[in-house]
Amino acid sequence: MDSSEILRLTDIRDTDRDETLALLDRDAGEQVLDAMAVLRGRLGAFPGGYAPSGSLDEFVWLEAYLRFTPELLAYWDGLGIPAEISAATLADLGRNVDITRRVLGRFGLETFGWLSLHYAGNLFQLGRLQFHLLPHHEDEGWAAPDEWILSVHIPEGGGLSPAAVDASFEEAVAFFGRHFPGKPVRSAECISWLLDPELSRRLPESNMARFARRFTLERTSSSPTDAVYFTFRKRGLDGLELLPRDSSLQRAVLEHLDDGGEWGLGHGHLTLPVL
Ligand SMILES: CC(C)(COP(=O)(O)OP(=O)(O)OC[C@H]1O[C@@H](n2cnc3c(N)ncnc32)[C@H](O)[C@@H]1OP(=O)(O)O)[C@@H](O)C(=O)NCCC(=O)NCCS
């Protein structure tokens, strides 16, 4: 597979093309080979968390992901994963390189840990949502020990309409039943700022609140910067007075902070539809 094909498959944007190609236009160094060995060890092993980054930086990981793409695709081919689902899933690499440019104003992959989930081969974009297939663990008292769990993620890009979310959950049930028949799933979980109950209080009619209401809220946890990061693509809580208040979400996020509140994460779960 040549470099152009890897860039096409990972949906690297034109603005990031030259710098991405430069990473591939040389022999892989020792650190990149080390990172690829880590990815190889995780492929098909259903790890729950990110690959330990060790001393390797975001550029090493980005190059390793690009170079490892053919091996990931071969693994997915062996599972019979359709090419369009592989492509939709891999497009998160280009999306995150683009987000890095918007957040930091430069080329890179700030969120390199996140992509290590995709490159373990058990996270897929199915319609509007991403689903990460994981073994049951003890925290999930709401699921039977023999069940596998779908952890749900919401990539940016397009609205979160109830119809799109319904279609995505139905696609997920059919997909995992077909491609992972020995790993039965009945429940999904979501850990997100979208499930912070304050968001549904402030914007009860929004798509985001409708999405959150699908889940039974287990608990909340602290993560004070997520709402600002995902709404404004800005790290930290400095300079909030400079941020726009154009949409109802932007106003809700900032007004809660103006009122002395703190944003966090909601942890919720739901029962998947039976087809
Ligand atoms: C989650 C997401 C898809 C929801 O989009 P959506 O379906 O358009 O959201 P809603 O219809 O509920 O939006 C309600 C209002 O908030 C605004 N809004 C939604 N997401 C916004 C965003 N990221 N930035 C600014 N405004 C946003 C909408 O424009 C709308 O404004 P209006 O009432 O003034 O017209 C979107 O926020 C997004 O892409 N977020 C980034 C990804 C993310 O947060 N993932 C979860 C990570 S844990």
Image (cartoon, grey):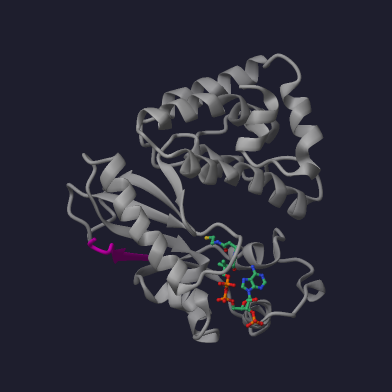
Give the image location of residue 187, x and y in percent: 27, 58
Q: Observer-nearest residue: 198 or 181?
A: 181
**Is 66 situated above or below 91?**
above
From where the camera sits, is residue 57 visible? no
**Is 199 situated above or below 112?**
below
Q: Quadrant of residue 30?
A: top right
Give the residues drawn in magenta, as a range: 268-275
Residue 27 covered by magenta stretch: no
Q: Is residue 256 rendered to the left or right of residue 27?
A: left
Give the image location of residue 63, x and y in percent: 66, 28
Give the image location of residue 16, x and y in percent: 77, 40
Q: Quarter containing ligand 1?
A: bottom right
Q: Observer-nearest residue: 182 or 8?
A: 8
Q: Quadrant of the N terminus?
A: top right
**Is 216 situated above or below 144?**
below
Q: Is residue 128 rendered to the left or right of residue 272?
A: right
**Is 14 situated above or below 215?**
above
Residue 274 covered by magenta stretch: yes
Q: Residue at x 31, y 47 (%)?
A: 176
Q: Is residue 92 rendered to the left or right of residue 141?
A: right
Q: Residue at x 78, y 43 (%)?
A: 14
Q: Residue at x 64, y 85 (%)?
A: 259
From where the camera sits, is residue 223 visible? yes
Give the image location of residue 239, x and y in percent: 79, 69
Q: Observer-nearest residue: 180 or 239?
A: 180
Q: Quadrant of residue 82?
A: top left
Q: Is residue 257 rendered to the left or right of residue 173?
A: right
Taking the view exactly as shown, the residue that stands out farthest to the front is: 83
Q: Quadrant of residue 221?
A: bottom left
